[in-house]
Structures are given as structure tokens and as C-alpha cells.
Image: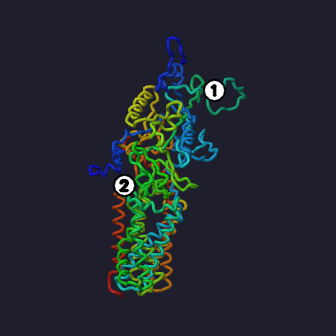
Amino acid sequence: MSDIDLKAMLYGLQPEVAKDSGHVDAPPRMGFFTDTSLCIGCKACEVACKEWNDVPEDGINFTGMSYDNTVSLGADTWRHVKFIEQPKALGNNFSGLRAPAAPSVDLGMPAFAKPGETLGEDGATEFRWLMASDVCKHCTHAACLDVCPTGALIRTEFGTVVVQQDVCNGCGYCVPACPYGVIDKREEDGRVWKCTLCYDRLGEGQEPACAKACPTESIQFGPLDELRLRAQTRVEQLHAGGVLDAQLYGESPVDGVGGDGAFFLLLDKPEVYGLPPDPIVTTRDVQSMYRHAAAAAGALLAGVALCFVGRRP
Amino acid sequence: MTDVTKQGLVGERPGREAMIGAHGTTERFRGGRKRRRRGGEQLMVPPAEPVSYYGRPVIKAPVWSARDIAGYLFTGGLAGASSVVAGGAELTGRPVLARAAKVTALGAVSVSGVLLVHDLGRPERFYNMLRVFKLTSPMSVGSWILTAYAPFAGIAALTEVTGWFPTVGRGATLVAAGVGPAVASYTGVLIADTAVPAWHEAYRELPFVFVASAAMAASGAGLICAPASETLPLRRAAVLGAVVEQLAAHRMESHGLVSEPYDLGKSGRLLRIARGLAIGGAVGAALGGRNRLVAAASGAALVAGSACTRFGIFQAGMQSAEDPKYTLQPQRDRLTAAGR
């Protein structure tokens, strides 16, 4: 235990995340690579996750947010497919959207745009639909795990982050600690819930339910090192194909959370997907916070004591 | 098309080679992408770039109830600082003030315990907090601080009221006075150690705001209960607390965009009321504290001001969590500044 670097426990590069948590002979760190360029928005991952993990219904709503009526990750949503509609071409792809075939009757009314102004030369317009299956990031430096006061949140031997439901007392501290807004409290149950990266399936050598169900291999499961290599190849491939917006998100082991165990290939800026562009684990600053609190406590003691100094009037 | 023939599989598509972009397209479409250069003014306003996902929050707002947790921030501070006041009164021979402060501390810490347990999703499991000690979790550290503090605050108050074991009572009073400041200040770390922008960015100032606010609350409680002959230190503490709180709060609210919630909506209203009560209470205590009635009224204003400060800061955190811009904009600015 003495060779553990205290600073690396809170922030920065941490290649041995399971060993750092006390696991001896841990298997390689496992994770997800969600390649959103392959996502077709079928939501099979959402359904498979719900079925396998017995996750309750998360509200029957109509949101008007494209095809997304699930809204966000939460206690009852551990995979969430996002839909973004953009007036933009995807690489050099042809959108398939064309001007109406039948010629319109000219009534001589003033038009807002000259013919052909808003459309391409061949009458095609631009449109792309971004779809992305979001999930718990299983951070290297997981704020939820750091701040959990009961030890209910643990790091597994696979390097994933899991809530022990028989320990959680529903204090809710992990909820605002998560920089991605993933973990949440199930109100009727009182405890917090999130993706377990199908810890029960991993133990049996199976892949998580969402990855198993994904028909396009948009969700890829495997050892994190391998996934990172695969992702690098894929993003280069997309750049070569003219999709210059393609970028990896959460794959860097030196980012603010020490890299995500579940990372993504995005086709636009993270903000567009509702993802924080540069998250930093809040506990990076916890030592400084304690120092300030200790100084404040000393100031209170000294300040009030000073007020008592002097002769009685 | 993939097909199985006698020669084997033909037209097989590669496993992970699904290509978006150039590989699937023809020159015609590429040509089609090239727009004529338009002369003159562009008629259409380019669509605003979405800065968030349908305006939804990026982080989850705390699931804590304001009554329980903001209430705890207030009662915890009142208890901790009251114990310090009790210690001072004990050592300087102010019997009425000592008794009042000890009883206040026990009452406040008892209420805070109830509030904390009540806010749990599984209150019957509150003791799971005491099965581990985690330095990375301010709530764990705080649970242990409270566990260390509460029994001494209890013994101090009970021995005072009953008159039993005065030596033990004196010892407990001094221990509680030593631990009390930690109870009052750690709550600043508790809320700062989250992804809530308005709280996290203010982590340097929050403990100072909280201890100053606690000093005002404890002074206020003492001013209500004790005669003027014993309250000179409280009048000083009220003024000192008010000054420090205003200074620390001003710094807390100087973090650019993420500080905006401290000024807006319900949070802004609460904090403006808090400021008025704090300044009014401190001025009243300083100028008219020798008058029993003015002292009590000033004391009440100080206590109420402290409560408003806690509820206002709590509310500011909620507001900053619920609007994605407070999470996204500073991060994007950070990346831009770093040239990424």
C-alpha cells in the first residue's frame, strides 16, 4: 500500500485503476467504446439494459426533442439514445432530401429567397441526424465514488464503478458530484442507481446487455486499451472520409477525470450532445478545500476568543 | 449485396468498416455539395449553434431538500459557533450566556442530526456512514466530526442544566468549543466538493462565509437569551462576523458567469434579505446592544440572516446546476484558453 501515489488517487494519469483500489491480480480494465457514427437510433441498447437489469419504467413522455422521449440518463435510464437534427451534411454524404418533384404553380407572390438559393445545385438540401447512446462513463477518477460516505460505490476488479445496493443509504451526495449528470436517486426506492457495466454478466465472461444487443456495433465492449486503439483507427478513417468533425470524447487518460472507462466517438462538439467539454473531477481540489475549511475553523475559534478578551465592563 | 455462392461468400461487407462520407458517395453528390458563390447579402441568418442538448441540464441538481440540507447548514453552524461562545462564556465567568449557548448548541445539533437523517433515502441505514472513514468524502469526514462533537455538546448542556458533575461539564464544554468550529466550517467543503458550478468555484470562500455566518447566528442567539452585562463579546462577534461574511461573500460572488445565480431569482432575493438582516443586526447590536429589547431584536435579525444566507447559497447551487450554460460555458472557455 505504501507505493500508492496519493495525488494519483485523486487526479491525473492512473493506469492501474483496479490495483489502485486494492484488487490483486485484476483482469484488464474493461469498458465501452460508443462509436456514434454507427448509431442508427434503434434504442435496442436502452431496451436490453432495462430488460437485463430490471430497470423500472422511466416515464411515458412526449418531449418534442426529435425521437428522444427518454430525456436523460438517470436512476431508471442507464443507456440513453440522443437524437440531434442538424442542417448540415455528414462528410460528403448526400442527405437524400430533395426539393418537391412537382413544380409549384407560380402565383407571382414575392419570395423570400431566390430559386436555388437555399438548395444545392441539384436541388438537394443538407440535413444530418446525429444519434448517440450515452451511458455512465466509469471514470478513472470517479467523483461519485470519491464522495460516497458509506462505501456503497466501489471500483470493481474490471475497473468499473458500481453501487452496492445493500449498502447505499440514499444520502444523494454522488448525484451532484458526477460531472456528467449520470447517477441519480430513485425517489420511490430511496437509493441511487446507475449503469453497472453489467457487472453480473462480466463476471460470467459475457459482454454487457447493451453491447450484445447493438445491431451495428456502435456500442463496442472490450479491454479499454484495445478499444482506444480501435477508436483511434476509426477516427482517422472518418477524417479520411471527409467527416472532419469526428472526434473522440473521454478517451484521453490525462483528461480531467483521468479518462473514461466508457468513451465515445462524436460527430460534433460535446456540448451538442449535452456532454461537458472539459469535465474535471471535483475531488481534484479536495485537499485545498480542507485547508481552507481548517483555516476558517481556526479563524472562527480565534475570532470569537478575541471577542472575549478584555476586562468586564 | 452479400451473397453465399458455391465459390463462397461474395460481396461481404467488412466488419467494422462502415464508412460515412466519401467512400459511399459519387462525384455527382460531391459536385452537388459545391455551392455557387452567392453575390450580395446573405438573406438567411445562419442557424445559431446549439450550445446544449435541447437546453437540458448537463449535471444533476442535488436531490437534497432545502429544508433538510440548507436547514442543516444553518443549525450545524449555529451549534458549532454556540459551543465556541459557551467556551468563552465559561472561561470568562458569564453564567447566563454559558448556559444559553450550551443549550442552544445541543438543541441545534440535535435538530441538525434529525434533518440529516430525514434527508436520507434510507434513513434506517444512516449508521452506514459510520462503518467507513473516507477522507475523499467530506460527508464521511463530517459524519465523524459530528459524532465526535455531539456527545460533548450534549454533556456540556446536560451538566449545565442539571448541575451534576461540574468538572466533567467544564471539560466537555471546552472540547465542544474546540470541535465546534470544524462543525461550522466543514459544511463549506461538503457542498463545494460537487460538480455544482456556483458551489465548486467558490470552494475557497464558502468555509469563511459559513463560519462568519455561524458566528453571527450564535451571537444572535446569545443576544436574545443573555443580559447586556454578559453580551459585550457577542456584540463584537456580531460585527466581526458581519464584516467577514460580507467580504467573503463578495469574493464568493466574483467568479464570473458561475457566480451569476447568487444574484438571480430566489437565491438573489434570499441573499439580499440575508445581507440586510446581517448588517441591520450587527449595527443594532453594536449601537443598541445594551438595551435588552434592541439586543433581542438584533439577535433575532442575526439568526434569521444566517438562515437566509444558508438557504440562499443552497438555492444558488440548485440554480447553477439546472442551467447547462453554467456547466458548459466555463469548460469551453477553459479549452479555448488552452488552445484546444
Residue A146 locus on image (x, y percent): 40, 53
Residue B10 locus on image (x, y percent): 51, 15
Q: Residue at x 47, y 55 (%)?
A: A167
Residue lying furthest top in this view?
B6
Q: Is residue A22 above or below residue B14?
A: below
Q: CA distance from mark 2 to mark 1?
A: 55 Å
Say what secondary structure mark 2 lies in.
helix
Q: Where is mark 1, residue-wise? A: A99
Q: Where is mark 2, residue-wise? A: A285
The kind of residue tagged 2 is: Asp
Q: Residue at x 45, y 72 (%)?
A: B78
Residue B179 locus on image (x, y percent): 37, 71
Is residue B141 visible in the rendered structure shown here?
yes
Say few, some or many: other residues with alpha carbon within 10 Å of mark 2 (under 14 / 14 to 19 / 20 or more): some
Provide the chain ID for the residue under circle 1.
A
Say few, some or many: other residues with alpha carbon within 10 Å of mark 1 (under 14 / 14 to 19 / 20 or more): some
